[in-house]
Amino acid sequence: MTALRRVTPQLLTLAALVALITVFFPDFLRIELVNGRLVGPVMDILKRGAPVGLLAVGMTLVIATRGIDLSVGTTMAITGAVAAWTITQGYGLAPALALALLAGVAAGLWNGMLVAVVGIQAIVATLILMTSGRGIAQLVTEGRILTFSHDGLAFFGSGALLAIPAPALLWLATAIGVALLMRRTALGMLTEAVGVNRAASALAGVNATVLLIAVYVASGLCAALAGIVATADIRGADANNAGLWLELDAILAVVIGGNSLLGGRFSIAASVLGALIIQTVDTGILLAGFPSEYNLVIKAGLVLIILVVQSPNLALHWYALRRAIRSRRETALASAKETG
């Protein structure tokens, strides 16, 4: 019940967005079975939201430790380039996936070491890889879009399992798995403890250094999965554009999910709903028929409204206003009884 109450604002926001989009596009909720797979705007949201959803899972863990990972977009470019290069060299699907995931682990380990061991601020440490990562990806692809025609790898971007898009299943399974791991073990509590006060958690016996490295590695793994999905979707690695600015959408998804950038308590489910809200806004703007040049402005306005409505301060002010109105009403009734 507590978990449901935690994500209620996000669920209500998502429901309101769906209702609003349905007004402009009545077939928004329509889902059909075509050639053995479910198609429709809702399924498109689940598929297209996979990269941001995966990034949001890893970003939630990093932000819970009072950190930030600005390099997830470039990590997507690197891992996508590694996967495509491995396929084009004829090594097969398993080595391609393994090397891509290993590249994601290496990126996360680099960030984690800079933050936890060297002591560089997270925003600066991850900015290093953010600025250099696309250069690394371009070295792998030799400065061109590296295309492939391997159906096995393409399945992760455009395939379907049980009529459901494979990217949707991948990011939902990842979110559920990480959420269960965090809440069914002590890892979630330890992560929150490091985020609230790293020094105090270390004094309490928590190995904060190892935990910090682990969450950045987890973020790198999630970025690697997102990179595989993005590369598989277009059957090619585009080092210049893969994951471009998606780190901002991932951070926004975490914030829309109600997670504090100051660390501490977190919710994977709320962040995933935040990613769904962002993708719903993007899809809704397109379906509503607005000119493309207005998309970013409309999206920014809608996100601002969502954040304001979900603001804890607004809820407190609303509660205080209701109490004040009730108090005045009771005082007025009491005065009327005395005069009567």
Image (spheres, grey):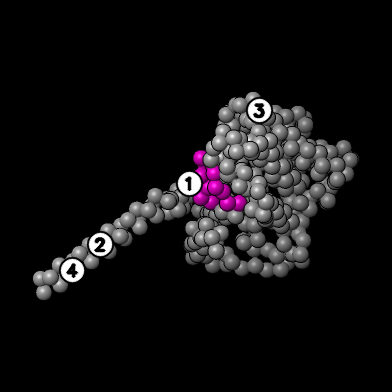
Q: Tell me the tag on residue 300.
A: 1
The residue to which callout 3 is attached is: 117
Q: The disc labelled 1 sits on which kind of residue?
A: Ala
**Earlier residue among tags 3 and 2:** 3
Q: Quadrant of residue 33?
A: bottom right
Of the two numbered discs 2 and 1 on the same chain, state the one appearing first in sequence: 1
Query: In the image, which is nearer the foreground, mark 2 or mark 1?
Result: 2
Residue under label 2, please give it: 327
**What percent of the width, then of the height, locates residue 253?**
56, 48
Q: Which residues are magenta?
A: 255-268
> Which mark is nearer the camera, 1 or 3?
3
For the residues labelled 4 and 1, the Cα–Cα distance comes to: 48 Å
Amino acid type assigned to the residue bearing label 3 in the image: Val
In whole angstroms, how far apart are the C-alphas of marks 4 and 2?
10 Å
Q: Earlier in the sequence, mark 3 or mark 4?
A: 3
Quick one: 293 or 94, which is closer to the camera?
Answer: 94
| The magenta stretch spans residue 260 | yes
Query: Which of marks 3 and 1 precedes in the sequence?
Result: 3
Residue at 11% of width from left, 74% of height from top?
340
The numbered disc on residue 334 is: 4
Quarter of the rendering occupied by the N terminus = bottom right
| Residue lying at 70% horizontally and 65% vertically, measured from the top left | 38
Whether residue 148 sits left or right of residue 246 in the image: it is right
Marks 3/4: CA distance?
A: 66 Å
